[in-house]
Amino acid sequence: MPASSIRARVRAEMIDEIKAVARRHLATDGANLSLRGVARDMGMVSSAIYRYFPSRDELLTALIIEAYDALGAAVETADAGADRRDLRGRWHAACRAARDWALRHPAEYALLYGSPVPGYTAPDDTIGPAQRPPTTLVAILRDGLAASLLTAPPGGELPEPVRADLAELADVLAPGLPEALLARGMAGWTQLFGLINFELFGRLNRAVSHRDEYFDHQTALMADLIGLPGPT
Amino acid sequence: MPASSIRARVRAEMIDEIKAVARRHLATDGANLSLRGVARDMGMVSSAIYRYFPSRDELLTALIIEAYDALGAAVETADAGADRRDLRGRWHAACRAARDWALRHPAEYALLYGSPVPGYTAPDDTIGPAQRPPTTLVAILRDGLAASLLTAPPGGELPEPVRADLAELADVLAPGLPEALLARGMAGWTQLFGLINFELFGRLNRAVSHRDEYFDHQTALMADLIGLPGPT
DNA sequence: TGTACATCAGTGAACGCGCGTTCACTGATGTAC
DNA sequence: TGTACATCAGTGAACGCGCGTTCACTGATGTAC
């Protein structure tokens, strides 16, 4: 290995460490991530960070993309671990994986799905990673339809403008998926993140104590609405 | 009117004005509300604010309570304006009112339902106002049941720990409501805020352009799940 | 293999800005006799 | 009705802290001949 690539490797490790420290900071400061604070924790002077990230916002962006990818990978892996033909099992596995990831990484979750960071607008590179979780969910529906395990609801129930929007969206997320089924998939996706939001941001605090069971039951209700077959 | 109460009235007006200015600030700074910024906008020196609020956090709390009350009132008024026996109409009206309020007051909505403010914990006075929207929603279900317009799903579908949690919760939100119906009401409530979150925080940006129709349709799906009678 | 040069990481000081909160104070407004 | 006193709103300076970013710099590490 040439000396230059040692330098490159050390550099890559530094970048990773900065991101790791920054992730820890997110937990206490929320999105008010402080470059100086990160530098302090690394035992460097604050300006040294600029060797690795050109600005605070770029560091934030890197964290956001990594978080989306981690969440997306968790959801995809969970889905992949379930029997292909057990749609309900796949749905539950994917939803649980999202929730588990969020509970294990609450600050990163908040960065992705909480209030927008003031003064920060996410660049376009975040779009792809952000689409992984919903893509995985609707893939379950598409597979089910292809295997005739599932029937699409009548499309006539959709108002025309909604149908048109969903048709375009289907091209991106799940080509060929009937609009009425995509609408239900979106409902499930919305519900999933509504549930996680409420749990994580304290909305269940004096209300629901058996969180796992509650989550599973709410998820099952959505599976019913979508029409996923399987044991209730 | 005695002179003293003139002073009291002026004081009350100042408090209102401070809150109004602070609300404007929320729109740009998010929850990083700055007392000095508010004071500047009012043409006062920053320390003068302390005549009216003992600390920044108390001002935040006042804004939060007012926002919850405004949202709660909007939802209640919308529900009250619909035919008592048209459960589906009431449900839609309440949901639309919540969304409308959120779209008109995005920063305040984010304060209530977005990521927690770092370093701030909401005091107990916020609990009551925060419960108004879900209380209104489940009241629709309770009314429907009382008027035999609605039947409760079989309670056997609920895992026991969830049933117990929901039984306690029913005592607070809607005494006597069967747990399985409350579970569906909670699903609707979760969905409602999931929908608003996604719309407000940009999750629908390159995906759904007919927001009103999409929202109504998603809300209708939840009404189906709950079993609300009425025209689909 | 050894030397001259280029690259790069990290330092330390500084700029210009922001913040919440305290404190002694001035003046105006109200109250009591 | 007039005067002495108390209350209160708002001022201005200060404390002590934080932040992102720039810039000239030192030394170490790598590269080319």
Image (tube, coloured by chain):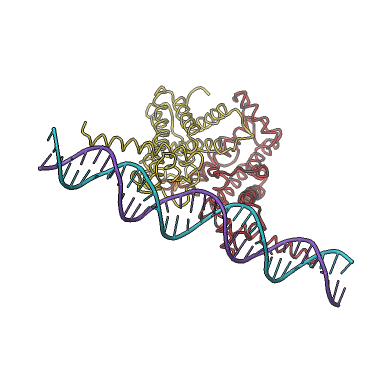
Chain colours: A red, B yellow, C purple, D cyan
Q: Return the x and y of residue B175 as percentages of the image width and height.
A: 35, 38
Q: Residue at x 58, y 44 (%)?
A: A120
Residue B108 vs residue A153, the one in the foreground: B108
Place residue A168 in its image quadrant: top right
Q: Return the x and y of residue B134 as percentages of the image width and height.
A: 42, 37
Residue B177 vs residue A128, the one in the foreground: A128
Q: Quadrant of the image for the N terminus of chain B?
A: top left
Place residue B74 in its image quadrant: top left
How many numbered marks, from 0 up? 0
Residue C6 vs residue B78, the one in the foreground: C6
> Viewed as shown, does residue A109 lie left or right of D33?
left
> Viewed as shown, does residue B2 lie left or right of A221?
left
Place residue C3 in its image quadrant: bottom right
Q: Return the x and y of residue B226 as percentages of the image width and height.
A: 48, 32
| Looking at the image, residue B142 lies above or below residue D9 | above
Q: Return the x and y of residue A142 as percentages of the image width and height.
A: 68, 37
Residue B188 vs residue B126, the one in the foreground: B126
